Image (spheres, helix red, strand yellow):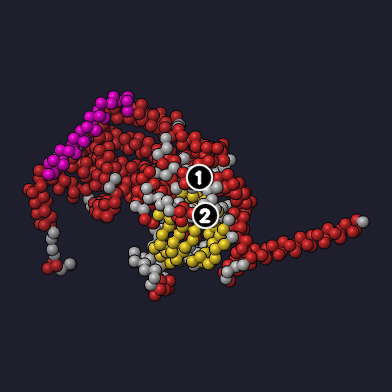
Amino acid sequence: MFPSSWEYHIAPQVNAAVRWLLSEYGEGFDAFSDGLLKLLLSIQGTLQLVPWWGYIVVIAALTWVATKKVVPVVILSLMPVLIGVFGLWGLAIETLAIVITSVVLAGILMAEVKVFDLIVRPVLDAMQTMPSFVYLIPAMMLFGLGKVPAILATLIYALPPVIRLTSLGIQLVPKPAQEAARAYGATRWQLLTEVRIPLAMPSILAGVNQTTMMALAMVVIASMIGARGLGQEVLLAINRIDVGRGFEAGLGIVIMAIVIDRITQGMAKKWDPQKRA
Amino acid sequence: MDEMDTRRRNPEESPGSPEIKGKQSHSGEEKQAAIKINELWKVYAPKDVDIDVEDEDLIKSLDESEESVVAVRDVSLEVNPGEVFIIMGLSGSGKSTLIRCLLRLVEPSNGQVVINGYDVTAMNKKELTEFRRHQVAMVFQHYGLLPHKSVVENVAFGLKLQGVPKKERQRRAREALKTVGLEKWANYYPTSLSGGMRQRVGIARALVVESPVLLMDEPFSGLDPLIRREMQDELVRLQEEMHKTIFFVTHDLDEAMRLGDRMAVMRNGSIVQIGKPAEIFANPADDYVARFVQDKRDEIRKADEQMEKFAKACAQSEKVVD
């Protein structure tokens, strides 16, 4: 046995820290929470404005642009109809809103890549292996029940791939091309927008794809702290041991995943500069 | 083309930015040299050590240390306007570092570079960017094309950075593509072009910005011998029309002799000899240069012998026929 006299717990300190944050900066967290909620609600509001067949048209168009094949267009645009048939359309849109908000926030955070690399990345890497329930509870305590902690938990879990793949993609941009751009008088910004980002695009899109998939994977867990959507439906089904209902909702998540995955992957391929020759 | 040519003939009137125009000195002495390099040093060291080039002990210790390299060592030279100036040396002699110091792609450790009267080494970031956009253009050994842009977009890249409107830069880029014989390939991507064609694109990209100075870093080294020869002839033809100041780096003596008005031989970061190619060929300054030249002489001697044999053989066969 491990000697019991060596035992030392950091649990009280962590508890105290969370309580202290709550009492000292509660208003700050509330303000942050409100801001995030506004962003989410505006995205969700926009998504809800679009009629159901609008999504079918958009999906068909995007798939056509990405693949230029008829069969995937038909299959991918018919799949969401199934979600509607199961009566899950509204919930699916709410889930989509959470996923999109997380990915948009991930993108905004990406802009500050430099600071990110140094501090946030190791933390995020650690958080990815940390069981999500562990940070769901403090997130809930700090930001209250509902969508905001769900977004933050999703963000923490889903952010690393897009960051890693973006920085990898930028590292792999050929040096001669960058040097030539500098020689012709490209500023740092122009180097980034004209050379680095376009050439790293396949990698960045692969990261977006991964992040989106992981965000979808968090949907059920996020529903435990009050996020509505398809995840909540799964959670309810589990509580009531209603296998059929759970299956329908699960299928809805899978359909969303497949559609988003195919479209982003198709885009990534299309962007690949080597294949456009 | 006429309009472009007249502008190229007068490097003094080339479109420079008004921001840095003020920096241009108009003293007669500086106007004479298109490129003037004064006691230039570049030391690659693990830490940013202050390099005191006067300190011989420090330089010696840098030479001996495995972590640092003295790539350019006290180089001073002048290039006249409209001249093709060749830097020749083996790989690792510092010639590529030297050419990069001219527009500060590599930051020199010490010394001064003056191009067309602009003191490059004294510029701040903004001035340097403007300088790179208007005063110099560079051609690279590995082409440095942007794989996600079409050929015409690649050629127009420098103009885009200059802020030239889209229509005009497309027109000028197509014109430049015509001068290098690639107008049909304008909408292709660089990946579908051969090495020689890619370098033509690189040259078109350099010509289109209409800079008075052209820097070429082993532009033809990666090409096969026939294409290389063709490209050299083409450069000679272009230079007859445009009279730019060309700073040309190569390791190929043939190329140096074919293209160069004057040349400098570099070894271990230092200039060993400067002169007309024929002079250097005739009077190598030291063993290193002599060895460079020797191969070429052997080649010529062998060719002469072959020709003699051939002539004899011809004479004999004629006798037989008689």
Q: Quadrant of the C terminus of chain B?
A: bottom right
Q: Looking at this rendering, what residue extends furthest in the right direction? A: B322
The mark that comes first in sequence, 2 or 1, is: 1
Residues drawn in magenta: A28-55
The question of residue B140 being in magenta is answered with no
Q: Amino acid at mark 1?
A: Asn
| Residue wearing tag 2 | B80
Label 1: state its secondary structure: loop
Label 1 Cα crowd, 10 Å radius (few <14 / some 14-19 / many 20+)? some
Main secondary structure of the magenta stretch: helix
Quadrant of res B68 = bottom left
Q: Which residue is mark 1?
A: B10
**Circle 2 Cα neighbour tier, 10 Å, few/some/many (<14 / 14–19 / ≥20):** some
Q: Quadrant of residue B180?
A: top right
Chain to which the residue tagged by mark 1 belongs: B
In this rendering, the answer to whether B55 lies above or below A60 is below
Residue at 39% in and 75% down: B57
Residue drawn at point x = 24 percent, y = 43 percent: A154
